Amino acid sequence: MILFFTLVFGLLFGSFLNVVISRLPLSIQGEDISINHPRRSFCPNCKHTLGAMDLIPILSFIWAKAKCRYCQKSISLRYPLVEISTALASVLIVSQFSVGIQSGLLLLFAYMLIALFVIDLERQLLPDILTLPLLWLGLIYQMYYADLQSGVIGAIAGYLFLWSIYWLFKLIRHKEGMGYGDFKLLAVLGAWFGWQALAFIVLASSILGIIWQIISKRNKNQPFAFGPMLILAALFYVLSPQPMLLL
């Protein structure tokens, strides 16, 4: 029964997270003020306010056949995928750690990583309003449930490593190779997983980035979001009993 309610909660939170993913970048870039002055959910195309039936996670997407009921504009597959991701993350975490403060911190971590993944993929943006609190949450988690020293070293090493790569690339190529948000995200992952995880995360994310460049047939000078690669690498690290063997 607990897992059922956890699943429902995850789906509902995923629906809320979709709102954050859509509105937060607009608010940061000055294109929208809905974060500071909230309004009911609406279609981004026709601006029609959505009814209760339009907001049921996953089911509303299926019922409407992936289209807005008011303007017939196609709805991005991102919406149900985020809801499914938050639901799965919720069930996995609660089934492993039960209900408590530890699982609550891990749920926040998972939800915010999902938001960062999608925002960076869509906007090439990793908002400080998500990464910085996540960094401190990671250190708090390490303090009570793991090794604080490892988390502190991981956060510092993660940031400084990509910062060094950034400046080395800039000195050699005279252009920026990545954004500061990537430094902060690797610091976040170092804080949560400890310095021991950094080598795998850096190597795996680099390999994933190369694969993505090849698959997407991007020009080598065309920028792409590196944050999702870091997050996927961290996911592989968590799921694999011996992560370095994957490489």
Image (cartoon, grey):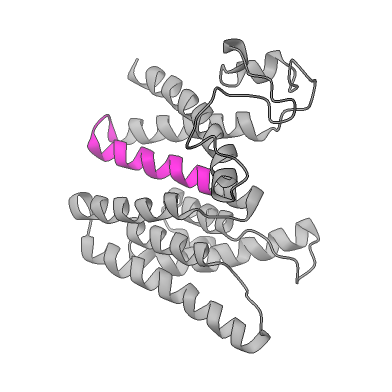
- In magenta stretch: residue 96: no
Residue at 65 percent of width and 35 percent of height: 78
Corner quadrant of residue 142: bottom left
Of residues 233 and 13, the one nearer the viewer is 13
Stretch of the chain drawn in magenta? 97-116
70 shown above or below 225: above
Of residues 139 and 176, the one nearer the viewer is 176
| 144 displayed left or right of 120 | left
Corner quadrant of residue 153: bottom left
| 170 displayed left or right of 92 | right
**Secondary structure that dominates the magenta span:** helix
List x then y, in percent, for residue 9.
42, 23
Residue at 42 percent of width and 67 percent of height: 198
- In magenta stretch: residue 114: yes
16 shown above or below 53: below
List x then y, in percent, for residue 138.
31, 53
6 shown above or below 145: above
List x then y, in percent, for residue 229.
58, 57
Furthest-left residue in this view: 144
Residue at 69 percent of width and 20 percent of height: 48
Q: Quadrant of the C terminus?
A: bottom right
Q: Quadrant of the N terminus?
A: top left
Q: How many marks can you see?
A: 0
List x then y, in percent, for residue 126.
52, 55
Residue at 43 percent of width and 50 percent of height: 129
62 shown above or below 21: above
| 88 displayed left or right of 41 | left
